[in-house]
Image (cartoon, helix red, strand yellow):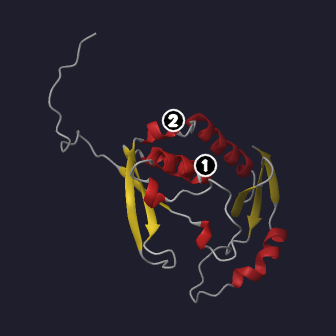
Amino acid sequence: KKKKKKGDVNPLEVPDGDQYMTAYALNEYDPSQVANAPPARPGASINWREKIDNQAGAVLASELKNNSFKLAKWTAQSLLAGASQMKIGFVSRTSPKNAYEHVVLATQTYRPMDFAAQITLNQGTMWGHMRLFIKLLENEPEGKYVIMRDPNRAIVRIYGVPPGTFEDDSDGSDEEDGDEDSNEEDGGEGEAEE
């Protein structure tokens, strides 16, 4: 084996070819500020302002526990995009009662392949799930479907819904609220074990 020659590395030099980065933001959730919310279980939430500088790993671990699907989805998107970096920002409200002004407390940069290994996201399993959904839907008529996971059991349900469902109304009215029951009756339903 040849030994690599040691040399100075300039971090501003970009290797040949395009490099892509994906950026995402995690919002701090403080259950004590939500009206009529049940009390949070002990240890469920961490005050990011106190912990982000010294215990960034604990903040990320807490978010992995509470938002594992979101982080797995972002990682999968980064892998599919061919991004060489994935940046995650930790965002908090400037004031708990002000929903419009936020501050970025910190950012962390990861290589998507390394982060996938860290959160135990197996790409083979990811593609296996995609293949399962394609097989389930390939014999169904063309249309719009909703895929929902049962929160209490390892079952995924697939519902056929009318074509106009979930479309934005130009006047902003909530016409969909009254049609929820009819959507389930109009479409078919299928189940798949996870």
**Numbered badge on residue 38:** none
Compared to 44, does 33 lie above or below? below
Quarter of the image with the C terminus in it: top right
Q: Residue at x 81, y 68 (%)?
A: 184
Q: CA distance from mark 2 to mark 1?
A: 16 Å
Q: Which residue is mark 2?
A: 117
Q: Residues within 10 Å of mark 1 (few under 14, many from 20)?
A: few
Q: Secondary structure at mark 2?
A: helix
Instruction: In this rendered view, identify the residue nearer to me: 9 or 147.
Output: 9
Pointer 2 or 1: first along the chain: 1
Q: Residue 182's quadrant in the figure?
A: bottom right
Name the amino acid, label 1.
Answer: Lys
Q: Nearer the viewer, mark 2 or mark 1?
A: 1
Q: Name the residue at 69% across, 48% down.
A: 133
100 versus 32 height, above or below: below
| Residue with the mark numbered 1 | 65
- Residue closest to the far top: 1
